[in-house]
């Protein structure tokens, strides 16, 4: 099963591949495609799930609220900028945290490397 989130300008599609890990435990694995060529330009490492997807009105970015299954670590907010293949990740902090939120910026490859080792 999958769910498509087409960018407002129609150039990109963020597809969530949805599958059950266990009874009532679902993972929605995100992959970003260039519509015209069908080329995948970003795919989250396995066990990452996007719980929310929101495109900017100008299609410059897509924001994902993501978590690593089974949820034992804080979730992250991910912004992907498809035209430049750059991104940003912000690690969610508990309300009582005293340190600032951790933010990582870089190419899609660098974002994937961070998610892979998180």
Image: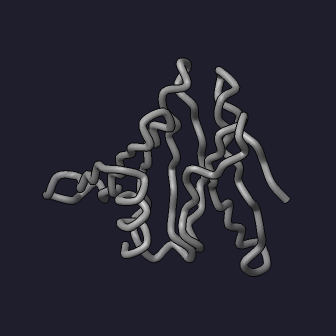
Residue 96 versus residue 69: which sits nearer the camera? 69
Residue 98 versus residue 112: which sits nearer the camera? 112
- Residue 6, horizontal then vertical, whole percent: 71, 33
Extreme-bottom residue of the structure: 22
Residue 34 versus residue 28: which sits nearer the camera? 34
Residue 83 versus residue 72: which sits nearer the camera? 83
**Residue sitting at x 76%, y 43%:** 4
Extreme-left residue of the structure: 98
Residue 53: quarter of image: top right
**Residue sitting at x 55%, y 53%:** 42
- Residue 17, horizontal then vertical, whole percent: 74, 59
Q: Is residue 115 left or right of residue 39?
A: left
Extreme-front residue of the structure: 37
Asked if 85 appears above or below 26 in the picture, the reply is: above
**Residue sitting at x 43%, y 72%:** 116
Q: Is residue 80 left or right of residue 33?
A: left
**Residue sitting at x 59%, y 62%:** 49
- Here the colouring is one colour
The C terminus sits in image quarter: bottom left
Extreme-right residue of the structure: 1
Asked if 77 appears above or below 24 in the picture, the reply is: above
- Residue 58, horizontal then vertical, whole percent: 53, 18
């Amino acid at each position: 099963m999958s769910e498509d989130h087409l960018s407002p300008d129609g150039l990109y599609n963020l597809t969530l591949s949805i599958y059950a890990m266990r009874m009532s435990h679902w993972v929605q694995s995100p992959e970003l495609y260039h519509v015209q060529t069908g080329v995948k330009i970003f795919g989250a490492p396995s066990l990452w799930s996007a719980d929310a997807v929101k495109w900017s009105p100008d299609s410059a970015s897509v924001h994902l609220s993501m978590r690593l299954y089974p949820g034992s670590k804080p979730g992250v907010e991910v912004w992907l900028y498809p035209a430049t293949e750059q991104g940003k990740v912000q690690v969610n902090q508990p309300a009582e945290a005293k340190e600032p939120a951790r933010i990582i910026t870089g190419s899609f490859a660098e974002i994937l490397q961070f998610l892979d080792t998180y």
